[in-house]
Image (spheres, grey):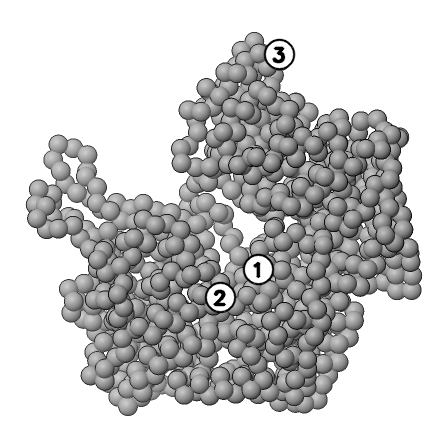
Amino acid sequence: MATSTTVQFKNPLEDLERQAKTVDPCIMVIFGATGDLTGRKLLPALYNLASDGELPAHFACIGFARRPKSNEDFRNEMRKAVDSYSRVQPVDTNTWNSFSESIFYHRSEFDDDKGYEELRNLLDSLDQRLGTQKNRLYYLSTPPSYFAQIIEKLHKHKLLYEFSEKSQPWSRVIIEKPFGHDLTSAQQLQTEITHYLNEQQIYRIDHYLGKETVQNLLVFRFTNPIFESLWNNRHIDHIQMTVSEDIGIGTRGHFFEEAGNLRDIIQNHMMQLLSLVTMEPPNHLNAASIRSEKVKLMDAIRQYKPSQLGSNIVRGQYGPGIINGEQVLGYRQEKDVDPKSDVETYVALELFIDNWRWAGVPFYLRAGKRLPKRATEIAITFKRAPAFIQQFDEKRTTANILVIRIQPDEGISLKFNCKVPGLHAPLQPVKMDFLYGAYFGATPPEAYERLLCDCMAGDNTLFASVDEVIASWKLFTPVLDYWKAHPSTNFPNYAAGTWGPSESDELIERSGRQWRLI
Amino acid sequence: MALTKEACLFNLIVYAPEKERIPRLLDIIQAISKRFPSRLIFISLDESLQEISIKDSGNSISTPSSSLHKVPFYVMPHIIPDLPITLLWGTDPTKDKTLLPYFQGFATRIIFDASIHDEWSAFGQRMIDHTTDKQQAMIDISWALISGWRDALARLFNDSTTMDALSYCKKIRILCHNSSDYAAGIYLLSWLSSRLHWSLSLSKHCEGVLEAHFNHDKGNLTALITEEPNSKDQEHGISSLEIITQDDDVYLMTHRPPHRTITTHVMHADSCKLPITLPYTGINNSYLFSKELLHHHTGEHYQHMLKALLHFSKEKQHAPV
């Protein structure tokens, strides 16, 4: 491993009071650069960062992939992608022209030593030309099976530096999900990569954590005492979390056949949301404190007993149906999907958190594809008013519900009861609604912009720690094992365009509650 | 994200005492309102009136100076309660003894345009005194206008090698879009001198050129601030900055409207580097400019710049800018 020893340069012109973070000059290498993620998310994010002045002046991006391609080809493809997917439109030609000069393409197999030697030469020459100060950000946007191999090769070719808190140059690695496919494989991957990397150099990306609304969860909870004081089992009846997608699996058939919805959505995104909504206030707003509280929370989630695995977690798979008035295929008819596939496209579950704050409060999580609409939200249902207040119209009295909408229509709403004007006193639930778009404009930074910027600044607060990932796998690996041992007998069990299988309704109705109609 | 309905983040009270500064204030209001919806109340001074004139349901107030004392009583009923109050003041806040004292007790932020005043040293001293005990954020528009240039310089000279080259600087040439923007040029120069410990030995102003001489530990440097010859009226701030070192390395940074960028060319005696493009935080870059006005504080760099401004006029040999 190369050593990093240079003392950090202190720039007298830099105004740290204005800049939240110092983003160092660096070169970002994207492994698997010809994949969808690069064009749809990564390059548009980098372009927008450049446009907003958040990228360092001395910066380069190298696409590393197997297909033969020139720098010019790659730049042209990326321009088209940025034109299509950038949140800021139209793309500013002047900014793009300058930015695109720092984009390069390097063709190599992931296991080819020669390719890494050539990469090193390219990186060295770019450092000379662009002043990128030997800092490296490696983004592994490849199938998970390559993660360990690429890191081993980077180490072998001295492209990774030994970690040290304050020294430069630095090398950091962003790893796309999934981190392992169960507990054993996650632990194994962690063991393999920590041969070459310190945990501080590993950035496990979960793009949900980069979303403005998700970041606002901490601000909302901990800077508004009126809500935090109600945030416990004395006042909250239950919490529902929904990640609903109207799309199917599209071109991700191969990937989804290996993953399924539990691994794709619940194990990572939803558990991150759950931990942010339910964790205790951190002592400090830094990565270590926040991660520590998240891990404590994850450890407090009650493990499922073997007898509950068939009843407390429901799985489903969509069949043909109608979405937005159009007939769509069932999962088993999708491209690259086994016609007898047993892979779940829907999961609903009930879980409990065994700590002082949440004892007895049920949490209902559901995530599915080909549901009626796209919506991600957290709904906190408060306990109802006491029943003895009979003078009010009890049948019309509803529970207060605080809804945090993650996407779309990002915002927060509170439902409460109101008297309808008039001589009699019928009640009517009404909603106070805060919409991000109405206050802060239509184009908040994309999640990847924030996360890439944080990684360049060495801030891993919004990335998942290994302890969080392992805790999540500990909870869900027995479920996956159970499903493997007990294949479904009724798939497909919900039609595309409906809210999931009937077992899901039965799951929540057992406790006298209902899924929210979103 | 769907923009389903207009909202309101704060109250924005604007005071335009001079007619010729109204277009610039309107540009700023437009930049802010593009990104941050607010309740706007616009107060202008109009000596042709006999009495206060109210338009647009109270959002536009014109008044002769003799009725200025009545203005707060027209404004306050239109304030949206519980939301912050931001003042956008088209004048030197240290000199306004009429309206500002009334409103500043309610304000959370005062944005001011003091680019036309008679004497830099006195202004610097007044601002230092004025901001010392203030609870509100005080934002100087001329300072906001150079934030993109400050960022660009910080990014360009972001390692010990380039910073070393800058320490051998022998000449700086700043072009402003028009002569009323010399404040931005002087601010940038004062900021650089405060950060890099240059000391002013002489400054003079004649025939539209402001010339300053500095000493530093590697030698002397001359700085010139002039007006961009072909500038259009609607532009504000600095249009280019050229730094030449004792080794004749040239760092040329230019802003060409309508681009929202600063392009930097670095030329050494024997080679040129690829140009670098950085964002320009001008009024036409509404997002960054509004952030600068509404979310940042002036801070230590501004205070140090003001102190450098005190020196700037000590050896004054020039007529008012």
- Spatial separation of the CA atoms under disc 3 and disc 2: 61 Å
Which residue is rendered at x = 61% and y = 47% of the image?
B288
State the SS at label 2.
helix
- Spatial separation of the CA atoms under disc 1 and disc 2: 29 Å
Q: Chain of mark 1?
A: A
State the SS at label 1.
loop
**Disc 1 residue type (three-letter):** Ser
Q: Is residue A467 above or below residue B259?
A: below
Does mark 2 fall on the same chain as mark 3? Answer: no
Q: Which residue is mark 1?
A: A86
Position of residue A180 in the picture relative to residue B224 (left or right): left
Q: Is residue A106 above or below residue A424?
A: below
Q: Look at discs 3 and 2 and give the one toward the viewer.
A: 2
Q: Is residue A257 above or below residue B38?
A: below
Q: Which residue is mark 2?
A: A287
Residue B48's disc is 3
Which residue is rendered at x = 43% and y = 50% of the image?
A436
Give the residue at the far top of this rendering: B50
Q: Chain of mark 2?
A: A
**Disc 2 residue type (three-letter):** Ala
Does mark 2 fall on the same chain as mark 1? Answer: yes
Question: How many neighbours does mark 3 have within 10 angstroms: few (below 14), some (14-19), or many (20 or more)?
Answer: few
Q: Is residue B275 above or below residue B126?
A: below
Position of residue B62 in the picture relative to residue A68 (left or right): left
